[in-house]
Image (tube, helix red, strand yellow):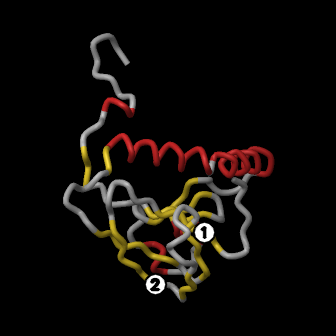
Amino acid sequence: MGYGAPSQEPFHFPEIYEGNTTYTDIMRKAMRTKYSILRYYYTEFFLQSNYGGPAIYKPLWMEFPNDPLAYQNETNNVMIGDSLKVSVLANAFGVNQTSFYFPKDTWCNILDFKDKCFTTAGETQVRSSKAYEAYVHMRQGKIVPF
């Protein structure tokens, strides 16, 4: 960042996003989420480096190539390794809901334990798309280091 450029530290964004949630709160939560799955990233990079394989961050269809619905909406449905599905929120202002596809499996939200695990035969779910919400689901039978 150059001299005279606006500061980008989270504490410089105290404005209210919604209710009592500030932009600083949203950034703080995003950083905690990133650091909470850092060991998983390191494990995936180690495996990729030593054993090769597909990309670590990839569209959903790369993990589920025989599921024709996995090819739809590639920007909102991605996998990190073979264990975590990240449902990327829509980027437009005023978008309150986003559709996410979940292939056949059992999925558990690892960031919000109130969001119960669910089994799907392959379905699209509509979920809220607030800036402070994140959806990272772990597949059944997988181990993710925290």
Name the kind of residue labelled 1 in the image.
Glu
Q: Which residue is mark 1?
A: 63
At 59% from the left and 58% from the top, the residue drawn is 80
Residue 26 lies, in percent from the top left, at 38, 47
Q: Which residue is mark 2?
A: 123
Question: Disc number at residue 125?
Answer: none
Labels in figure, total: 2
User: In the displayed structure, does residue 83 sit left or right of residue 88?
Assistant: right
Q: Is residue 135 above or below residue 22?
A: below
| Residue extending furthest toward the front | 20
Residue 107 lies, in percent from the top left, at 58, 76
At 53% from the left and 80% from the top, the residue drawn is 67
At 53% from the left and 79% from the top, the residue drawn is 103
Residue 102 lies, in percent from the top left, at 50, 77
| Residue extending furthest toward the right | 50
At 37% from the left and 55% from the top, the residue drawn is 132
Name the kind of residue labelled 2 in the image.
Glu
3D distance between C-alphas at marks 1 and 2: 16 Å
Residue 76 lies, in percent from the top left, at 40, 63
Q: Is residue 128 above or below residue 81?
A: below
Q: Residues within 10 Å of mark 2 (few under 14, many from 20)?
A: few
Q: Residues within 10 Å of mark 1 (few under 14, many from 20)?
A: some
Q: Is residue 125 above or below residue 12?
A: below
Rendering quarter of residue 96? bottom left
Q: Nearer the viewer, residue 62 or 57?
A: 57
Q: Secondary structure at mark 1?
A: helix
| Residue extending furthest toward the left | 94
Q: Nearer the viewer, residue 49 or 99?
A: 99
User: In the displayed structure, does residue 46 sit left or right of residue 84?
Assistant: right
Q: Secondary structure at mark 2?
A: strand
